[in-house]
Protein backbone atom coordinates (compact mmCIF):
# COMPACT_ATOMS: atom_id res chain seq x y z
CA UNK A 1 0.00 0.00 0.00
CA UNK A 2 2.76 2.44 0.93
CA UNK A 3 4.60 1.58 -2.28
CA UNK A 4 1.48 2.32 -4.32
CA UNK A 5 1.01 5.72 -2.60
CA UNK A 6 4.66 6.64 -3.23
CA UNK A 7 4.35 5.50 -6.85
CA UNK A 8 1.14 7.52 -7.38
CA UNK A 9 2.71 10.59 -5.74
CA UNK A 10 5.78 10.17 -7.97
CA UNK A 11 3.60 9.97 -11.13
CA UNK A 12 1.55 13.02 -10.10
CA UNK A 13 4.65 15.10 -9.33
CA UNK A 14 6.28 13.97 -12.58
CA UNK A 15 3.24 14.88 -14.66
CA UNK A 16 3.01 18.33 -13.04
CA UNK A 17 6.70 18.89 -13.75
CA UNK A 18 6.30 17.66 -17.34
CA UNK A 19 3.34 20.00 -17.86
CA UNK A 20 5.37 22.94 -16.55
CA UNK A 21 8.33 22.11 -18.82
CA UNK A 22 6.08 21.76 -21.89
CA UNK A 23 4.27 25.02 -21.11
CA UNK A 24 7.56 26.93 -20.79
CA UNK A 25 8.83 25.33 -24.02
CA UNK A 26 5.70 26.29 -25.96
CA UNK A 27 5.80 29.82 -24.54
CA UNK A 28 9.49 30.17 -25.49
CA UNK A 29 8.95 28.93 -29.04
CA UNK A 30 5.97 31.29 -29.44
CA UNK A 31 8.10 34.25 -28.28
CA UNK A 32 10.90 33.17 -30.63
CA UNK A 33 8.45 33.09 -33.54
CA UNK A 34 7.17 36.57 -32.64
CA UNK A 35 10.74 37.90 -32.48
CA UNK A 36 11.62 36.41 -35.86
CA UNK A 37 8.44 37.81 -37.42
CA UNK A 38 9.14 41.28 -36.02
CA UNK A 39 12.71 41.14 -37.34
CA UNK A 40 11.58 40.13 -40.80
CA UNK A 41 8.91 42.84 -40.79
CA UNK A 42 11.48 45.51 -39.92
CA UNK A 43 13.72 44.41 -42.81
CA UNK A 44 10.93 44.21 -45.39
CA UNK A 45 10.77 47.94 -46.04
CA UNK A 46 14.51 48.40 -46.53
CA UNK A 47 15.43 51.39 -48.66
CA UNK A 48 18.42 51.49 -50.98
CA UNK A 49 20.50 54.20 -52.63
CA UNK A 50 19.64 54.73 -56.30
CA UNK A 51 22.43 56.49 -58.16
CA UNK A 52 25.05 58.96 -57.01
CA UNK A 53 25.37 61.46 -54.19
CA UNK A 54 25.37 65.03 -55.52
CA UNK A 55 27.03 67.94 -53.75
CA UNK A 56 26.14 71.56 -54.44
CA UNK A 57 28.78 74.07 -53.34
CA UNK A 58 28.13 77.65 -52.28
CA UNK A 59 31.80 78.47 -52.88
CA UNK A 60 34.14 76.53 -55.15
CA UNK A 61 37.81 75.66 -55.40
CA UNK A 62 40.17 74.19 -52.81
CA UNK A 63 38.52 76.23 -50.03
CA UNK A 64 34.97 75.49 -51.24
CA UNK A 65 32.00 74.83 -48.95
CA UNK A 66 29.12 72.42 -49.58
CA UNK A 67 25.66 73.94 -49.18
CA UNK A 68 23.50 70.96 -50.17
CA UNK A 69 23.74 67.18 -50.50
CA UNK A 70 21.16 65.29 -52.54
CA UNK A 71 20.65 61.62 -53.33
CA UNK A 72 17.90 59.31 -54.51
CA UNK A 73 16.42 56.30 -52.71
CA UNK A 74 14.04 53.52 -53.64
CA UNK A 75 12.75 50.31 -52.11
CA UNK A 76 14.77 47.12 -52.16
CA UNK A 77 13.27 44.24 -54.11
CA UNK A 78 10.25 42.91 -52.27
CA UNK A 79 10.30 45.77 -49.78
CA UNK A 80 7.24 47.33 -48.22
CA UNK A 81 6.51 51.09 -48.22
CA UNK A 82 8.52 53.54 -46.09
CA UNK A 83 7.24 56.85 -44.72
CA UNK A 84 9.53 59.66 -45.90
CA UNK A 85 7.85 62.47 -43.96
CA UNK A 86 10.41 64.71 -42.21
CA UNK A 87 10.13 63.98 -38.50
CA UNK A 88 9.00 60.42 -39.14
CA UNK A 89 12.21 59.64 -40.98
CA UNK A 90 15.43 60.94 -39.43
CA UNK A 91 18.57 61.67 -41.37
CA UNK A 92 21.81 61.80 -39.41
CA UNK A 93 24.83 63.58 -40.86
CA UNK A 94 28.25 63.02 -39.33
CA UNK A 95 31.88 63.80 -40.08
CA UNK A 96 35.01 63.94 -37.92
CA UNK A 97 33.90 67.25 -36.36
CA UNK A 98 30.18 66.83 -35.72
CA UNK A 99 26.98 64.80 -35.70
CA UNK A 100 23.66 66.41 -36.61
CA UNK A 101 20.14 64.98 -36.91
CA UNK A 102 17.92 66.39 -39.65
CA UNK A 103 14.27 66.01 -38.64
CA UNK A 104 12.14 68.73 -40.22
CA UNK A 105 11.38 70.41 -43.55
CA UNK A 106 13.82 73.26 -42.96
CA UNK A 107 16.62 70.67 -42.65
CA UNK A 108 15.77 68.38 -45.58
CA UNK A 109 13.23 67.66 -48.26
CA UNK A 110 12.01 64.34 -49.64
CA UNK A 111 9.95 64.23 -52.84
CA UNK A 112 8.83 61.59 -55.32
CA UNK A 113 10.64 62.24 -58.60
CA UNK A 114 9.40 59.16 -60.49
CA UNK A 115 7.27 59.89 -63.55
CA UNK A 116 4.50 57.83 -61.95
CA UNK A 117 3.17 57.24 -58.48
CA UNK A 118 1.20 59.43 -56.15
CA UNK A 119 1.98 62.65 -54.33
CA UNK A 120 2.01 61.28 -50.77
CA UNK A 121 5.15 60.94 -48.67
CA UNK A 122 5.19 57.13 -48.74
CA UNK A 123 8.02 55.57 -50.72
CA UNK A 124 6.21 52.77 -52.51
CA UNK A 125 7.11 50.11 -55.06
CA UNK A 126 8.59 51.67 -58.19
CA UNK A 127 8.84 55.18 -56.75
CA UNK A 128 12.11 57.06 -56.36
CA UNK A 129 12.45 59.82 -53.77
CA UNK A 130 15.05 62.56 -53.94
CA UNK A 131 16.33 63.61 -50.53
CA UNK A 132 18.07 66.97 -50.17
CA UNK A 133 19.96 68.07 -47.07
CA UNK A 134 19.44 71.83 -47.15
CA UNK A 135 21.47 74.87 -46.00
CA UNK A 136 24.48 72.86 -44.86
CA UNK A 137 26.71 75.94 -45.01
CA UNK A 138 24.60 77.50 -42.22
CA UNK A 139 23.28 74.55 -40.14
CA UNK A 140 26.55 72.65 -39.66
CA UNK A 141 28.85 73.91 -36.92
CA UNK A 142 31.96 73.07 -38.95
CA UNK A 143 31.37 73.71 -42.64
CA UNK A 144 31.68 70.74 -44.99
CA UNK A 145 34.69 71.58 -47.11
CA UNK A 146 37.16 69.76 -49.32
CA UNK A 147 38.78 66.38 -48.63
CA UNK A 148 36.33 65.52 -45.84
CA UNK A 149 34.77 62.12 -45.27
CA UNK A 150 31.15 62.26 -44.20
CA UNK A 151 28.41 59.72 -43.44
CA UNK A 152 24.67 60.03 -43.89
CA UNK A 153 22.31 57.62 -42.15
CA UNK A 154 18.72 57.46 -43.39
CA UNK A 155 16.65 56.06 -40.50
CA UNK A 156 13.04 55.14 -41.34
CA UNK A 157 10.83 54.25 -38.35
CA UNK A 158 10.32 50.54 -39.23
CA UNK A 159 13.20 49.68 -41.48
CA UNK A 160 16.89 49.02 -41.66
CA UNK A 161 19.16 52.07 -41.67
CA UNK A 162 20.68 53.12 -45.01
CA UNK A 163 24.35 54.14 -44.58
CA UNK A 164 25.96 56.42 -47.17
CA UNK A 165 29.63 57.27 -46.72
CA UNK A 166 31.49 59.53 -49.15
CA UNK A 167 34.42 61.95 -49.26
CA UNK A 168 34.37 65.42 -50.76
CA UNK A 169 36.91 66.06 -53.54
CA UNK A 170 40.09 68.13 -53.03
CA UNK A 171 38.54 70.97 -55.04
CA UNK A 172 34.81 71.69 -55.21
CA UNK A 173 32.90 72.62 -58.34
CA UNK A 174 29.42 74.13 -58.24
CA UNK A 175 28.04 70.59 -58.70
CA UNK A 176 30.05 67.47 -57.75
CA UNK A 177 28.86 63.93 -58.36
CA UNK A 178 30.17 61.33 -55.91
CA UNK A 179 29.77 57.69 -56.97
Image: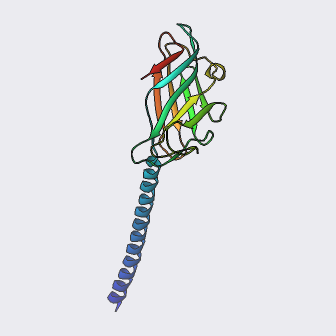
Q: Is residue 144 left or right of residue 11?
A: right
Q: Position of residue 170 (x, y in %)?
A: 48, 10
Q: Is residue 149 left or right of residue 141?
A: left
The relative height of residue 59 versus residue 129 in the rendered view (above or below) is above
Residue lying at the far bottom in this picture: please name it. Answer: 1
The relative height of residue 10 versus residue 89 in the rendered view (above or below) is below
Image quadrant where one finds the N terminus: bottom left
The relative height of residue 34 versus residue 170 in the rendered view (above or below) is below
Residue lying at the far front in this picture: please name it. Answer: 115
Q: Position of residue 162 (x, y in %)?
A: 47, 36
Instruction: Give 12 or 42, whichever is nearer the viewer.
Output: 42
Residue at 58% over, 37% down: 90
Q: Position of residue 37 (x, y in %)?
A: 43, 56
Residue at 47% over, 29% down: 164
The relative height of residue 64 versus residue 7 in the rendered view (above or below) is above
Q: Quadrant of residue 5?
A: bottom left
Q: Position of residue 53 (x, y in %)?
A: 48, 25
Instruction: Give 97 or 51, whichever is nearer the viewer.
Output: 51
Amino acid sequence: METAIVLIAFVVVSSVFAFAVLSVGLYSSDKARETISAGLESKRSTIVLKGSVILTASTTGTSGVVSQISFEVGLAAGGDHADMTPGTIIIRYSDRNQVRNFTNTTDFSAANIASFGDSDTLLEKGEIFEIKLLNLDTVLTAKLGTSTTFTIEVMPPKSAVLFISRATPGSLETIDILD
